[in-house]
Image: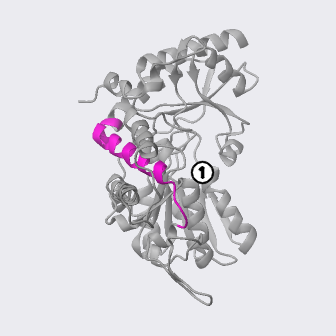
């Protein structure tokens, strides 16, 4: 059974105070907190088990290699990939998407080709494609959301034309919480011979993911949003797409042989993992995913849905609070502005005095801010260790902010 009090006991930081108030951490969309098992695994890896991986034959190197490589299988289980060799370990979603841009798209797109995106994309799923627009002359095709923040999958499908080579779409908006029907999009794109990348930075945090069912070609995830360390992550790459890719980074480990006049690349996925990796970060990442799977991804999804509904009820009752987007299917992410507040930063500063941590700004979603006609918003993003009482604390702090600004 899911017991949030037991879950919270696993996270040391949740028992601390900020500004003399119990911490209410609602900035999970930016980065999640870490359970004790992850912290202990990182400490142990540095204190008792550290060595470089893959290159040594001594005990510590073999141990580090075994723990590091086991994470590939953990990620495969987490995403239900058909084979662990479809998992490339990296530093997170940003590196994963850039790898797709340079290792796959650079090889398969030419001037006049296009990539279909939604206006809800995070900059990590925008800027690498702008690099290709600047350097080889591809076009970016943008699909809008409706007034409530919904993204109609048919609108994405209709944007595909004879020059479309890739659809790159978020699984869940980091600003509005909108959950996108990526399965419908990916299956339709496949039937049209178009590759698909689904940004899993938020989606994989809040719901079980089955990349085989979704049918995508690429699915990157970020460790620090999944209760793991910063500098950790992975990307699922369908085997046939991996065969189409050239290495993005060159160096040690990604080669079998190096000579003065030739090189022979390593086999995938090692072919795409150059240099000494984030060994300890990746080990901690694997422990974090194991922890979440033991809690139960379905349990997390159900609990967060209940928490989200409660937060929606409390926040929509505040007639002076403007919720940015209220899509039909969403996760526990709420972006808002206030009528009397000068800037989102002012709101977040007052909330912080009450121990409530939220994010303020554009949330790396410039096109979405432009689409909504705002310069910034506050964002409260929930995790499976948050509670209804913390929602109440957020609402109380918002009342204080409104009184001060009003």
Question: Residue 161's spot in the image, x, y percent?
Answer: 58, 72
Occupied quadrant, residue 11 = top left
Q: Can residue 171 be seen in the rendering of this structure?
A: no
Q: In the displayed structure, does residue 39 sit left or right of residue 169?
A: left
Q: Is residue 111 above or below residue 66?
A: below
Secondary structure category for the residue under label 1: loop
Q: Is residue 28 above or below residue 247?
A: above
Q: Residue at x 33, y 58 (%)?
A: 73
> As rendered, which of 225 and 149 lies closer to the eye?
225
Q: In the displayed structure, does residue 64 sit left or right of residue 276?
A: left
Magenta run includes residue 281: yes
Q: Residue at x 57, y 36 (%)?
A: 325
Q: Residues within 10 Å of mark 1 (few under 14, many from 20)?
A: many
- Magenta-tinted stretch: 274-300
> As rendered, which of 329 and 232 lies closer to the eye?
232
Magenta run includes residue 145: no
Occupied quadrant, residue 5 = top left
What kind of secondary structure does the magenta stretch mostly adopt?
Answer: helix
Q: Residue at x 43, y 47 (%)?
A: 285
Q: Is residue 242 above or below residue 339?
A: below
Q: Can residue 284 be seen in the rendering of this structure?
A: yes
Q: In the displayed structure, does residue 395 sit left or right of residue 84?
A: right
Question: Residue 79's spot in the image, x, y percent?
Answer: 36, 55
Q: What is the basis of the colouring in this image?
A: one colour
Q: In the displayed structure, does residue 94 sit left or right of residue 127?
A: left
Question: Residue 349's spot in the image, x, y percent?
Answer: 68, 21
Residue lying furthest bottom: 261
> What residue is pinned by disc 1?
121
Occupied quadrant, residue 322 = top right
In what quadrant of the picture does the C terminus appear? top right
> As rendered, which of 246 and 251 lies closer to the eye?
251
């Amino acid at each position: 059974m899911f017991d949030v009090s037991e879950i919270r006991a696993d996270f040391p930081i949740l028992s601390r105070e900020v500004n003399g108030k119990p911490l209410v951490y609602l900035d999970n969309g930016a980065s999640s907190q870490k359970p004790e098992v992850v912290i202990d695994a990182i400490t142990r890896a540095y204190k008792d088990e550290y060595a470089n991986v893959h290159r040594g034959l001594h005990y510590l190197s073999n141990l580090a290699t075994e723990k590091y490589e086991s994470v590939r299988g953990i990620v495969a289980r987490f995403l239900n990939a058909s084979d662990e060799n479809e998992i490339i370990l990296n530093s997170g979603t940003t590196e994963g998407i850039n790898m797709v841009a340079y290792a796959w798209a650079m090889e398969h797109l030419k001037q006049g080709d296009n990539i279909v995106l939604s206006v809800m994309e995070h900059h990590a799923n925008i800027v690498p494609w702008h690099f290709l627009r600047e350097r080889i002359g591809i076009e970016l095709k943008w699909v809008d959301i409706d007034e409530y923040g919904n993204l109609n999958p048919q609108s994405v499908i209709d944007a595909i034309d004879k020059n479309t080579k890739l659809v790159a779409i978020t699984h869940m908006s980091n600003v509005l919480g909108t959950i996108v029907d990526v399965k419908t999009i990916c299956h339709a794109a496949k039937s049209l011979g178009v590759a698909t990348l689904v940004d899993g930075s938020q989606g994989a945090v809040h719901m079980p993911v089955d990349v085989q069912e979704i049918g995508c070609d690429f699915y990157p995830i970020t460790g620090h949003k999944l209760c793991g360390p910063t500098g950790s992550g992975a990307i699922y790459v369908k085997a046939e797409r991996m065969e189409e890719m050239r290495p993005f980074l060159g160096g040690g480990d990604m080669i079998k042989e190096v000579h003065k006049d030739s090189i022979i690349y390593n086999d995938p996925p090692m072919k795409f993992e150059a240099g000494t990796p984030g060994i300890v970060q990746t080990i901690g990442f694997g422990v974090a995913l194991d922890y979440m799977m033991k809690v139960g991804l379905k349990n997390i999804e159900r609990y967060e849905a209940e928490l989200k509904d409660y937060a929606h009820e409390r926040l929509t009752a505040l007639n002076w609070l403007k919720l940015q987007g209220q899509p039909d299917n969403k996760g526990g992410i709420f972006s808002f502005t206030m009528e009397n507040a000068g800037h989102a930063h002012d709101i977040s500063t007052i909330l912080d005095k009450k121990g409530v941590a939220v994010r303020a700004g554009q949330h790396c979603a410039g096109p979405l801010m432009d689409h909504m006609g705002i310069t910034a918003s506050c964002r409260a993003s929930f995790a499976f260790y948050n509670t209804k009482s913390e929602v109440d604390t957020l609402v109380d702090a918002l009342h204080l902010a409104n009184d001060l600004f009003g």
